[in-house]
Amino acid sequence: MSRNIRHAALFCALLLVALLVNAARVQVLRADAYDSNPANRRDAIARYQQPRGDILVDGRPVTGSRDTGEHLRYERTYREGPLYAPVTGFASQEYGTTLLEHTEDGLLSGAAPGLAPLPLWNEFTRGHNAGGHVVTTIDPAAQRAAYEGLRSRKGAVAAVEPSTGRILALVSVPSYDPALLSGNGATAREAWARLNADPDRPMLNRAVQRTYPPGSTFKVVTAAAALDAGVVRNLDKATDSPDPYTLPGTRTRLTNGSEGCADASVREAFVWSCNTVFAKLGVTTGVAGMRATAEGFGFNDAEVRIPFRVAPSTFDTSVDRAQLALSSIGQYNTRATPLQMAMVAAAVASGGQVRAPYLVERTTRAGGGMVSTAGSRSVRRAMYPATASRLRELMRGVVEDGTGKKAAVPGAIVGGKTGTAQHGLGNSGTPYAWFISWAQGGEDLEAKVAVAVVVEDAAANRREISGGGTAAPIARAVMEAVLNSGPRPPTY
C-alpha cells in the first residue's frame, strides 16, 4: 500500500512540475505571442477600462471619453472635431490612432512608464495609471479664423510664432469629425468606408502631410539665396532681365503675369512677382547656392516631427540650368507643405533664423504634475541677418504697394508674398493660390505670427489669384486673431 502511495505522490509531483514548467513557458517564452494574438482581447479591454487623457487647446480639453457600458468601456469623444482634427487625429477602437492621438498614445492611455510613481511599479502591482494630458501650442482664435476663412474650399493653413517655433494654427479643409471613428460598431465602419472613398480625402492633413508647388512664394527663398551669394547687392538696380526669358539651353520662353518686368529691379520684381527676373536670378546664383539656402529654410529635411511626421518639402538639386530656372520660381520639382512655407516667412521675420516647429507645449499627469515640456528648440540660420532685413522690406512692399494689399492689418506691420502655382497635365488645373506672411503689432518689438495659406480650388481667375484675392484675406484673418489674442488662462 505504501508503495502505491509513493508512486502516486511521485506522479503528482511530476504533474505539478510539468504544470509549473508549462506555466513558465506560457508566461515567459510565449507571452509575446499570446499578447499579440488577435484573439486575445485582454489588452484591449484593459486599455479601454478607464477614460483616456485629454488634448488641451488654450487650457480647455478638445477631447473627452464616454462610458459605453460595454467590454471596451470608454470611447473617445471630440469637441468641435472637424476644427481640431488636423491636430488631434483620431483614436478609434477599430482603426487605431493618428496624429497627436498616436504620437502621445502612451501618455494619453496611461501606459507611458513616466506616469508610474516609481520605476517598474506597474510591473509589480499590475496596476494601470490614469491617462495624462497633452497641452498644445494652438491659439484657438487663430485656428478658428483659418478654418472659417477656408470655409468649403479645399486647402490648408499653418501659422507659427517666429521667435519660438510654436504652431499657432494647423487647419486642413475639407475636414471630418474624428468621433465618427471612435467606436467599433457599424457606425464606425460605415464612416471609415465613406471617408476613405471620398475623393476630397478629408482625413488627409493638408497642412503637414501634403506638398504643393509653392509658386511665387518660393521667390522669398530665391531672393535670400541671391542676396547671401552677393548676386544682388542693390535692390533698386536694374537686373538686365529680358521679358520673355528664354530658359537656358532651350527654346522655351518664360513669361510674366504682370507688365513692366523687363529689366526690372529686384524690388519691383518682388512686388509685382516677375517670373523672368527670379528665374534668371536662380540660374545666376547656381544650384549650390540655391540648395544651401533652401535647405537652410528646411527643404529636403525628412526628419521633421511636430511630434508627428511632416512630409518633407523638396528642392531638386539634380537639375540642369533650365530646370533650375523653373525651380527658382517654385515650379518644376519644388514642393512644400504649408507648414514649411510658414517657416520661410517666420525666418524672414526673425532675422534669418529658423526655429524647429512644435505642437506640444507640455505633457502632464492626470493630477497636473509635469511629465515633459517642449524645452529649448533647435535653431539654424537660413540667411544672414542683413538679408532677412532686406527681405522684410521687400515683403512689406508687397502688402503696402503690390499684390498683397488684402493682407494689410490696420495698426500692424505686415509683410507678405503672393503666389500662383500651376499644376496638372499641361498646367490645366486651377492654379493653387498661395500667400505667406508675417505680422508685428504696432507696439510689439518682434513679429508675433507667420502664416502660410494655400487654396486648391480658388474660385477666381488667374489675375485675382496672383493678386492675393483668395489666400491673402485668410492670412489677414489669422494674423488679426493672433495680434488681438489676450493672455491665456492657466492650464491644468
Image (cartoon, helix red, strand yellow):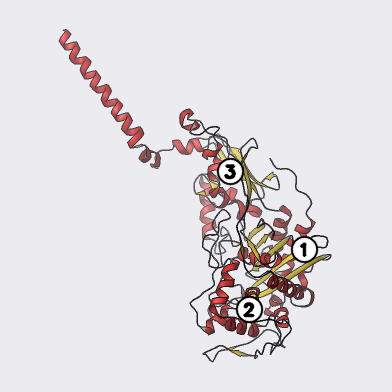
Residue 76 numbered mark, or none: 3
Q: Could you tell me the amino acid type at mark 2?
A: Ala
Q: Label 1 near label 2: C-beta < 8 Å?
A: no
What residue is shown with label 2? 226
What residue is shown with label 1? 440
Q: Could you tell me the amino acid type at mark 1?
A: Gln
* Numbered disc in front, either 3 or 2: 2
What SS does tag 3 mark? Answer: strand
**In this image, 484 relative to 123: left or right?**
right
Say which of 422 and 191 sits in front.
422
Q: What is the CA distance from the residue labelled 3 to the residue labelled 1? A: 39 Å
| Mark earlier in primary sequence (2, 1) | 2
| Residue at image location 60% in from the left, 67% down from the top | 297
| Mark earlier in primary sequence (3, 2) | 3
**In this image, 186 relative to 65: left or right?**
left
Residue 172 in the image, given as x and y percentages of width and height: 62, 60
Callout 2: 10 Å neighbours few (<14), some, many (20+)?
A: many
* Numbered disc in front, either 3 or 1: 1
Q: Could you tell me the amino acid type at mark 3?
A: Arg
From the image, which quarter does the N terminus lie in? top left
* Numbered disc in front, either 2 or 1: 2
Residue 253 in the image, given as x and y percentages of width and height: 58, 89
From the image, which quarter does the C terminus lie in? top right
